[in-house]
Amino acid sequence: MASPNLDTVRKDISGTDKQLLELLAKRRQLSMEVAKSKLASSKPVRDTTREQQLLVELIETGKSLQLDAPYVTQVFHSIIEDSVLLQQAYLQQHINPDTIAHKVRVAFLGQQGSYSHLAAQKYFARKAEEVIEHGCKTFKEVIGKVENGLADYALLPIENTSSGGINEVYDLLQHTSLHIVGEVSVPVEHCLLVATATSEEKIKTIYSHFQPIAQCSEYLSHLPEVAIERTDATSHAFEIVANMARDDVAAIGNADGGRLYGLTAIRTGLANQKQNYSRFIVVARKPIDVAEQIPAKTTFIMSVKQRPGALVDALIILKQNNINMCKLESRPIPGNPWEEMFYVDVESNVSSSNLITAMEQLNDITTFIKILGCYPSDDISPTEPVVD
């Protein structure tokens, strides 16, 4: 039996890929029609019961086509997530027409290739046709770009699953007049990146931002003879290593970012936690409204009276109003020794009756309270099919 002609097979694959893209585009259009129908019905964007039924049916159909369940599930998780985010973006633009723009100016830490840059690309992929990038050296400069009208949005890392909250960002949020209007979480894959053909054993100096250094502390603890140099951003570390072009220096950061500077990863998976994610917030000069069909988060800061149980009393108010708190972070108040400012994230729309009541009650027992923003939740958890 003659072997198939490779060129012919590759041509058929290319034709099939084109058909797949056309079908994906058609599915996107249908998702937009669903979003438009939800404007009038006020139905939630997500219907996890229907998603589960859909996945079960697709897995069964896939079996008849010799496609295994994990493959079908993975593909349609991506398709469903895209559909949800597309519908949310449409509903948000409808309720916030002033935010519609073909071109946006975005400030972030570092230059091309930094984690903040990658997060900005992900967040604005569905929200603008053109993104004008403003790389900055410090978080203060990032915020200042928006406060002074030189950028429309700022992207700031707020927490990491490995190293925890970014204290400098929390402290800056105490004093800015900007509002949180969005969030985005990105997977963090720390790699050891080099500019020349070398080996891990030859490395004498490693450059990176302090966050990747903290998140890779276990790996670095086994390199006592290696000097660790902090940089303003991972992109700055990439730039330094690329310019030095030596076999004894390396950077820690994202492989895709390092590739922009001609760097190659010689070791991956450096983070203390293998499931490593960073969450970023998006801030702007004006607050936004969040459509009722979309899961929302509200972030506020508060300080409580210096008496036993004051914080507990505040948190009980959230519980009594059936509001789920998903984040609580404390930071010292400058000039007030031993007093703390608490940052709180709750899963609730600021316009909901429950949160309005809770905020009124919190006003009575706190010494200071301020809403930093209400924004769509980035948590698009995949629905798992239940297959017998």
Image (cartoon, rainbow, N blue to C red):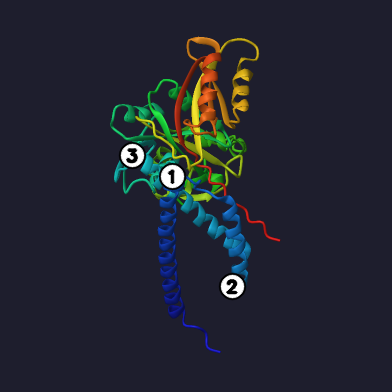
Report the amino acid beneath label 2. Leu
Name the residue beneath numbered marker 2: 65
Classify residue 123 by image quadrant. Answer: top left
Q: Which mark is residue 246?
A: 1
Query: Closest to the observer: 42 or 216?
Result: 42
Q: What residue appears at the point 62 percent right and 53 percent down from the top-left corner?
A: 384
Across the whole image, how many numbered discs are drawn on residues? 3
Picture coordinates of residue 139 (x, y %)? 41, 29
Classify residue 114 by image quadrant. Answer: top left
Disc number lying in front (1 or 2)? 2
Report the amino acid beneath label 1. Arg
Label 1 SS: loop
Disc number lying in front (1 or 3)? 3
Residue 327 appears anywhere in the view? yes
Name the residue beneath numbered marker 3: 99
Mark 2 crowd level (few <14, some 14–19, many ≥20, 10 Å Cα): few
